[in-house]
Amino acid sequence: MSEQAAPLRDVAIIGGGCYGSFYAGQLEAACRKGKLEVRRVLVVDRDPQCQSASTLPPFPGRELVRADWSEFLRGFLTAAPPAPGEPDDAIVPSPLTPHLMAGWLLDLARHRWPARESGLTTPDIPLGSPYDALGPDGTRYVSFADWICPTHCVEPLTCPMIRAPRTWEMSDALARYTARLDVRRPTRGPALFTTRHHAFGVGMFGAEEIRASRRSLEDAGDSGSAVDVVVGTVSACHGAVSILRLGGSAAD
């Protein structure tokens, strides 16, 4: 990486196991080489003896936060946004919890509209990507790759597998998917959490996009009408998709 990445305020790494330890090490290497500025690196795990705690060398600004991921996010994501032009927060998701943010949005919905029915439901029609399968929890897992991608691929504009320009973008595909679903039932969104490469092979989504997804949910629900919101945790090539279904208000 030849250029310095955009500075960050606090970076929360979800999980202190092998993935979280790798991500923390990479971000800290970027900082040591002058390629990244970070106020704090927060490694979030319920286990105080997780791999990150026992194997990572000391680094100024790194903290191990002993907490349940959902519990941590409720606090972390209510932090005030920075002043214009100042560094913002970011989250590094674990590949093993690809749709954690959908649960966070559902928690918000239940607190904002406690008298209305709400829940995550299965998207019942395929996206149309080469890989498209339902997980045991009803999440639809989709990908434009019908091959095994390189480990820690940063999804460049030229795909390293086909050695040709990448002509797809999952966020655009989900916007079209939302429009298709809206024909059948009022559907809004997509509320997206998009992982992008930031520094030294580490992907993350920024706090401003998280705030935008919250606003998307609030705009959809504040009408009082029953509505579905497409929620996606995605990268350029892959995604985990759910529907947050919100019932109408009693007066609707």
Image: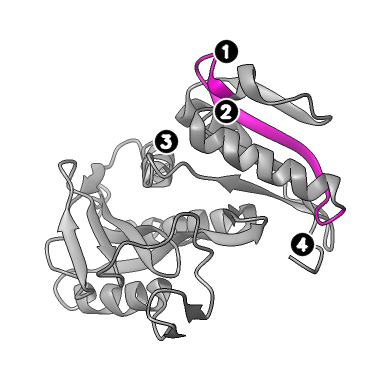
Query: Gap in Å between the C-alphas at discs 1 and 4?
Result: 30 Å
Amino acid type of the residue that numbered disc 3 sits on in the rendered structure: His
Image side of residue 81 versus residue 108, left or right = right
Q: Earlier in the sequence, mark 1 or mark 4?
A: 4
Whole-percent x, y for residue 19 in the image: 50, 38
Q: Is residue 45 left or right of residue 252?
A: right
Q: Residue at x 43, y 83 (%)?
A: 163
**Residue 40 picture quarter:** top right
Q: Which mark identifies residue 44?
A: 2
Give the residue type at disc 4: Ala
Q: Earlier in the sequence, mark 4 or mark 2?
A: 4
Task: Say if residue 226 shows up in the picture.
Answer: no
Which of the two marks, 3 or 1, is nearer to us in this view?
Answer: 1
Gap between marks 1 and 2 measured at Cα: 10 Å
Disc 3 to disc 1: CB gap under 8 Å: no
Which residue in the structure is indicated by mark 4?
Answer: 5
Mark 3 neighbour density, 10 Å: few (under 14) some (14–19) many (20 or more) = few
Q: Is 69 or 130 nearer to us in this picture?
A: 130
Mark 4 residue element: loop
Residue 160, percent from left and from top:
46, 74
Question: Which callout, 4 or 3, points at the residue further toward the start of the chain?
Answer: 4
* Residue picked out by circle 3: 111
Q: Give whichever of discs 3 and 1 has the lower sequence position.
A: 1
Q: Earlier in the sequence, mark 2 or mark 3?
A: 2
Report the residue at 42% width, 56% height from top.
217
**Numbered badge on residue 48:** 1
Foreground mark, 4 or 3, reads: 4
